[in-house]
Image (cartoon, grey):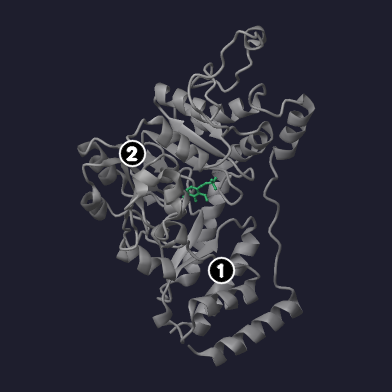
Amino acid sequence: MNSEITKNLLLSHTVLSKMFNFNLSNPGKYKGNELKYLKKVLKSENLSSLSGSWVGRLENNFCKTINSKFAIAMNSGTSTLHSILESLNLPEGGEVLIPALSVIMDSTVCFLSDLVPIYVDIDPNTFLMDPIDLRKKITRNSVAIITVSLYGNVPSMDQISEIAKENNIFLIEDNAQAIFASTGNKKVGDWGIASSWSFENTKHISCGEGGMVTTNKKDLAESIRKIGGHGFKNLRAEEGRVRLVDDIFQDPEYERHDILGWNYRMSEISAAVALAQLERAKELVAMRKYNANKLIEAIDSHKILIPQLIPENASCDYYTFSCLYNQEYSKGISWQEFRKLFKAKTGMGIYGAWQVQYKEPMIYNGAFKYRNKKLYDGLDYKNTKCENAEKVQRKIMQFKTNIRSKRLTDDIANKLNEIIKEVGI
Ligand SMILES: Cc1ncc(COP(=O)(O)O)c(C=O)c1O
């Protein structure tokens, strides 16, 4: 490590940005109909989807956007995954194949449903589930595969869905980080029996916290809605309001619940914001693509940063723009030092990747086992190893793509190019 170089560069970048106030500001994120719709919800005094209409409007609009028959809005992109797993009647202890490099929620939903996550290695260039390793990890106990469109990039869905079909197991898509991404003539959401989406604060469409399930199967949609809606018996695939016929619902003789369910419902307030965001989905995704392409241009052919590979004939939604940081092509500048330089010069951070899931203490210490002591007794992830995922995870640098001004993007891209020229070899 060459700490003298970093110290000097850091000093000059910090002084310069203070002198010239380099930081252009990022314009507001909620500049469509968000406020207008929110006012309408508040005026209606129906803030719950049990009687309001905004969640229904969001669901209908999402069906059209994704080209799906059914959509069920929920309060997060974790509730959605859990409800999908619960609705599939999977046997206790069934193995669910998930990419090693993803959020912890892909594991936690398995533990919540008495299932066993099995970690599949990734392709070191695309950072996505590797179909070759997937095939090796299928056993008689496999019940489902969850694919993840990491950073907006689509996994090898044709191969993966072939493997799912051959083995007669379910394919579920976790599309929390994508919305229109595609390969060939198919889009995310087209392959799985059900697809999960997130509207958490950083996502393409955001309302603070929220999520959506899409599926073309009516029975499954109904079951998912009931699981996420306290198991109310009159919930239907396409209808989330339970109090439509008030005289029946309020009759003391009326029985309400016929299955076990939780409260994963989205509020009308969140739906109003998400709907306004969804109206601008194309523009929001195009903006992230523009930003990513500017950063790709800035990196040019410098080997210090290698962008995530987007397979041929695929289109990536660039939830973030991610690269591998190759310290060996720098003048001895570590990952952390590069980040500091970038932050000093642009005022903007760089995100690291989450730990590979089984390297989180909750998993390797077995903290999840209390959920079902009998089932998880003897299950040990200490020797699990996905080499590519572990190698890539440490090197990943994710650049923000949620930059809503072309001037700001161009400024950041120029500064990235300058840093690369300064510290790259
Ligand atoms: C790939 C992936 N899956 C699932 C989730 C969970 O979504 P949420 O935060 O809405 O629960 C996220 C969000 O961070 C995610 O990025």
Which quarter shows the C terminus? bottom left
Residue 246 badge: none
Callout in the foreground (2, 1): 2
Q: The disc labelled 1 sits on which kind of residue? A: Ala
**On the picture, is 103 further left or further right than 88?**
right
Q: The disc labelled 2 sits on which kind of residue? A: Leu
Residue found 36% across the figure and 53% down from its top? 99
- Of 326 and 114, the residue lying toward us: 114
Which residue does the numbered mark 1 point to in the structure image? Answer: 413
Mark nearer the N terminus (2 vs 1): 2
Q: Is residue 75 visible?
A: yes
Q: Position of residue 360 (x, y in %)?
A: 45, 61
**On the picture, is 54 further left or further right than 334?**
right
- Of 423 and 236, the residue lying toward us: 236
**Image position of 357 with respect to 65: above or below:** below
Q: Position of residue 309 (x, y in %)?
A: 37, 60
**Image position of 80 with respect to 14: above or below:** above
**On the picture, is 206 further left or further right than 216?**
right
- Under circle 2, the secondary element is strand
Which residue does the numbered mark 2 point to in the structure image? Answer: 171
Residue located farthest toward the right when viewing the structure as drawn? 43
**Image position of 164 with respect to 123: above or below:** above
How far is mark 2 from mark 1, CA to CA?
38 Å
